[in-house]
Amino acid sequence: MGELGEFGLIALVNAGRTQTPGVLLGPGDDAAVIAAPEGRFVVTTDMLVQDRHFRTDWSSPQEIGRKAIAQNAADVVAMGAVPSAFVVGLGCPAETPVEFVRALADGMWAEAGRAGASIAGGDMVRSPLIIISVTAFGDPRRAPIKLSGARPGDVVAVAGPLGHSGAGFAVLSAGTAGNAEFADVETEFADVVAAHRVPRPPYEAVLELPDTAEITALTDVSDGLLADLGHIAESSRVAIDLESAALADPELEAVGKALGVSPLDWILAGGEDHAFAATFADSGDVPEGWRRVGRVVAGEGVTVDGTSRTGPAGWDSFA
Amino acid sequence: MGELGEFGLIALVNAGRTQTPGVLLGPGDDAAVIAAPEGRFVVTTDMLVQDRHFRTDWSSPQEIGRKAIAQNAADVVAMGAVPSAFVVGLGCPAETPVEFVRALADGMWAEAGRAGASIAGGDMVRSPLIIISVTAFGDPRRAPIKLSGARPGDVVAVAGPLGHSGAGFAVLSAGTAGNAEFADVETEFADVVAAHRVPRPPYEAVLELPDTAEITALTDVSDGLLADLGHIAESSRVAIDLESAALADPELEAVGKALGVSPLDWILAGGEDHAFAATFADSGDVPEGWRRVGRVVAGEGVTVDGTSRTGPAGWDSFA
């Protein structure tokens, strides 16, 4: 990268890209200009640090780029907003191969496209390790769906698989540990490994909610279901009770057995699936793409089958 | 920091802060919501890496925080937009003192306030070194002022001091080198050291431009005057000729003499002052707060007194 220089690199990652219409002015000036047709925009930002949030020996640069965009797009969608653009800060060692950076950008553009948006600008700097900072924007076409709207009597529902990323992380960890008995787990459980490498937030489950859906609170599952529903419970001053039977996922049974882990641990605390968890007023069926997993009640905290759960409670950056 | 945890830290840096009215929903949900009354917003992002963009033995955490916000606010203003909000990603080692983080946030809030905006949200993660990623937003109350509008015959003008940050950097470098002859330079030239630690972009010179000012192109001086005017020249397909006599700054004479450096080197290539450089249609005097330093002509490149300049040409992150 040192040979190309900052401006050569910026030209390289932007070559051949087509901005979506919401990007009124893309890279190349002091700042980009993004449309905000609703007169307001939602914004979220995440920083990813090499060897803490991703490993270059576990994931390809495309996969790392996709994941960085997906987790931010999920936060935008978790407000009920439609992704409109992203900006990306990238820190890399000078000796990083140019191909790595191009592939990282390819992954980012691919996931941005899946979310219906493009990458409007960014910054590239030299850093001793790879740092990716993504900021995502969205148009709130309806009132923002906050954490604080859940009410006793509401139904708790989720969209998208839970625990697959956590299971994939466990598989990769077991494989990397070098124990002969786990030599083949990565191949055997390629699906959950893929889910860990590239989360697939079901954006459409939120963005295509029918107008009749009485959604009262919404979040994406980034830190683990218990932790993220805990934020809804705390903000809404309610309690949430989950049904373990409704959460069970047959796809995780075999990998749990192979690694000696209860799949429910991954489902409740695994994080990084970027599924969506919501509460709906109880007016019959939950909308298409959602499955009912629990109930909002008076009180505080999150329980499973009526009891508090011990064990891993989710991700904390400094824990 | 490890003891407080991510959510404790987020609570700490946000305690007692008052959001400006443009922040419709601040920290605490999946994303923030920012007003965009013009139906569009400008956005820029910069990543600052410890020991590359700042040193904790050269600058206090307040100063580092101010500088991180100032350089992003300057990019927003360099589009002719009014800063509306910032979001901040922060990576820190777990052993970073909580007081450091609080002071960093204090500096950020102070400079955000000087720019008329507040910090609407962010992310905190663990990292082996301190990484600060700032994304800044602004309202374009007029058509964005781009790099590409300069025309032959225009006047080149600057607002704010040039070369002071570069001189301050040279003073700090000389002092740190431990040569006895430079032991007192930091105290003797405290003004330029302060300018290096905390740039003071003259936001008002742009934001209070009279409606009659025919500004044709604008940028902030982050990489050095030659480099940044080079971006205007290239985007506008014109040449720019500067007058060294108009650029001379008596305040830099003594420090140049003490360090054996021609002050013009700092003025032309120093960078990080976050002054503003603009071109105006030649209709008499340049607006208040601006000084005329050159002329737009046909051709390409940037010259000084009609000749190309050799020597340092400005900052490139990977050079």
Image (cartoon, coloured by chain):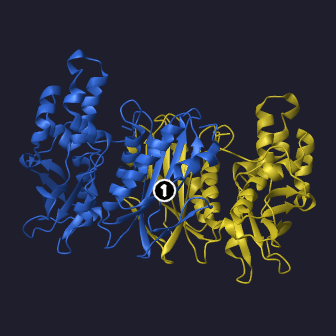
Chain colours: A yellow, B blue
Horizontal arrangement in the rendering, residue A174 relative to residue B258 (left or right): right
Q: Residue furthest top?
A: B180
Horizontal arrangement in the rendering, residue B36 relative to residue B151 (left or right): right
Q: Residue at x 64, y 57 (%)?
A: A70
Horizontal arrangement in the rendering, residue A55 relative to residue B50 (left or right): right
Q: Is residue A250 above or below residue A237?
A: above
Q: Is residue A146 above or below residue A64?
A: below
- The residue that disc 1 covers is B17
Quadrant placement of the N terminus of chain A = top left
Q: Residue furthest bottom?
A: A212
Q: Residue at x 15, y 26 (%)?
A: B258
Q: Is residue B51 above or below residue B24?
A: above
Q: Residue at x 85, y 34 (%)?
A: A182
The x, y position of residue A317, in whole percent, is 64, 43
Q: Is residue B102 visible?
A: yes
The x, y position of residue A232, in whole percent, is 72, 62
Q: Is residue A25 visible?
A: no
Q: Nearer the viewer, residue B54 or B188?
A: B188
Q: Nearer the viewer, residue B234 or A30?
A: A30
The number of callouts visible is 1
Q: Chain of mark 1?
A: B
Q: Report the amino acid beneath label 1.
A: Arg
